[in-house]
Image (spheres, helix red, strand yellow):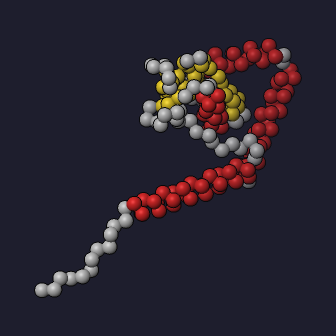
Amino acid sequence: MIAENGNEAGREKMRGKRSAISGQRSEAEGMRKEKEIRHMNQSKQVLVCKRRLAVKGRRGAVVTVQLFSPIRIDECEWRSRIRIEGTKLTIDHSIPGLDAFHSLTLALQLIKRILDSSGLVLTWEGGERGDHGFRRSITDVFGFEYALKLESLVAEQDEEHAAKLERQYKLKHRRSPVSTRTRKE
């Protein structure tokens, strides 16, 4: 409950701060500040990971996804930068969050959305055809209790599927009973 209240308090503080900021600045000033933050922090950000995705039906075509380290903007805002380039995609975006983990989580969710909506069939090295390797995560946008409920449902489905696979494996690899008769001499 503490985490929920702390997280919600942080969100409210961030929302309030944004409302105050947006009320004080024009849209042009806001865009200018965003560019300044991006420029200032790009030099501080370190490339954390990079993935190359093959594009189905386009020999040699590649989409590159990059995720950079989060940077602290102020006491209640961190930003993680993503860059996606290749085959009609050129995206360089900074994603805000309440802390570094929040920013990284939101960045990964945005990457998945962008790739899914690109209309391209993308495959990462080692993945199955059409698998870009970015998975949906459980959101906390609707509150902590709702996120826990979804996690519980996913865990239940995982356990059921694992049990089914285990039963199939045992049936397939069942040994025939060994004869317990002894030979008469």
Q: Is residue 164 left or right of residue 108?
A: left
Q: Is residue 20 left or right of residue 74?
A: right
Q: Is residue 139 left or right of residue 46?
A: right
Q: Residue 113: image x %, image y %?
A: 64, 31
Depth order, front residue of 145/42 = 145
Q: Residue 131: image x %, image y %?
A: 52, 35
Q: Residue at x 62, y 52 (%)?
A: 154
Q: Residue at x 76, y 44 (%)?
A: 142
Up the image or down, 182 lies above or below 151; here it is below
Count of all numbered marks drawn on residues in the image: 0
Q: Quadrant of the C terminus?
A: bottom left
Q: Residue at x 48, y 57 (%)?
A: 165
Please say whether residue 74 is visible from this viewpoint. yes
Residue found at the far bottom of this picture: 185
Quarter of the rendering containing residue 168: bottom left
Depth order, front residue of 81/119 = 119
Up the image or down, 51 lies above or below 4; here it is above
Please say whether residue 50 is visible from this viewpoint. no
Q: Residue at x 80, y 28 (%)?
A: 18
Quarter of the rendering containing residue 105: top right
Q: Residue 136: image x %, image y %?
A: 62, 40
Q: Residue 135: image x %, image y %?
A: 58, 39
Q: Is residue 6 left or right of residue 102?
A: right
Residue found at the far left of this picture: 185
Quarter of the rendering containing residue 75: top right
Residue found at the far right of this picture: 23
